């Protein structure tokens, strides 16, 4: 079974750098890993669903996720790498870690957003939470 890596994508410049790193790493290997591009959309409050139907909410989350994934998908397609993209809904950190476990990923690759550790902890940084929750290595790309 070939290795697989999860790349967390939020559409930011740091996540774009994580994709660049994953491309460089994958193309340098004898056996390229399967890359899972994963975007996590926040679940909307139940109050929202009282006024907006579920299909509209799902469409919004899918469209927002696709926007975030578009550049990463284009880069991986151009390189001919094996990947799949996924838009999930939930709290970002545990959702990413759970997906990585379900897919038996050997690594999670994320962009580091540049906050210091104290600021990250105070702000509830997704990156910090993933590092704490993940049973597999987490590679942070600056």
Image: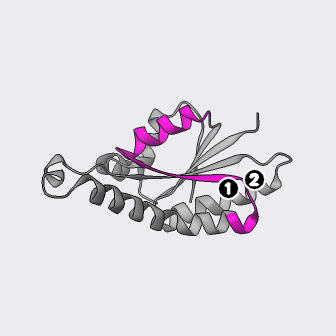
Residue 90 in magenta stretch? yes
Q: Residue 62 location in percent, x, y?
A: 41, 59
**Residue at image point 67% right, 42% down:** 4
Front residue of 32 and 140: 32
Expressed as whole percent of the image width and height from the top left, the position of residue 49 reads 18, 52
Picture residue at 40% right of the left edge, 64% below the top: 63
Residue range of the region highlighted in magenta in the rendering: 77-104
**Residue 53 appears left or right of 109:** left
Circle 2 sits in a helix, a strand or a loop, which is it?
helix
Badge 1: few (under 14), some or many (20 or more) residues near its Cα, within 10 Å? many
Residue 60 in percent (x, y) is at 33, 62
Query: Which numbered disc covers residue 138?
Result: none
Q: Is residue 16 left or right of residue 46?
A: right
Q: Quadrant of residue 72?
A: bottom right
Total numbered labels placed on residues in the image: 2
Residue 131 spot, x, y in % from top left = 49, 39
| Cβ–Cβ under 8 Å for marks 2 and 1 | yes
> In the picture shown, does residue 127 fall above or below 12?
above
Quarter of the figure with residue 128: top left
In whole angstroms, how far apart are the C-alphas of marks 2 and 1?
6 Å
Is residue 92 rendered magenta in the image? yes
Name the element at disc 1: helix
Q: In the depicted view, which residue is nearer to us: 80 or 135?
A: 80
Q: Residue at x 62, y 41 (%)?
A: 107
Residue placed under numbered mark 2 in the picture: 26
Neighbours of disc 2 within 10 Å: few (<14), some (14-19), many (20+): some
- Residue name at image x 43 percent, y 60 percent: 65
User: Which quadrant of the figure contains the N terminus?
Assistant: top right
Q: Is residue 11 visible?
A: no
Residue 22 - label: 1
């Amino acid at each position: 079974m070939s290795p697989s890596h999860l790349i967390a994508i939020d559409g930011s410049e740091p996540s774009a750098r994580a994709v660049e790193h994953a491309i460089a790493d994958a193309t340098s290997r004898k056996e390229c890993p399967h890359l899972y591009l994963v975007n996590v959309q926040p679940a909307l409050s139940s109050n929202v669903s009282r006024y907006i139907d579920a299909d509209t909410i799902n469409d919004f989350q899918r469209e927002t996720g696709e926007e975030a994934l578009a550049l990463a998908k284009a880069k991986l397609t151009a390189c001919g790498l094996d990947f799949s993209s996924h838009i999930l809904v939930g709290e970002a950190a545990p959702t990413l870690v759970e997906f990585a476990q379900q897919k038996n990923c050997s690594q999670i690759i994320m962009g580091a957003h540049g906050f210091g550790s104290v600021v990250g902890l105070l702000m509830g940084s997704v990156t910090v939470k993933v590092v704490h929750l993940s049973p597999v290595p987490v590679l942070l790309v600056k």
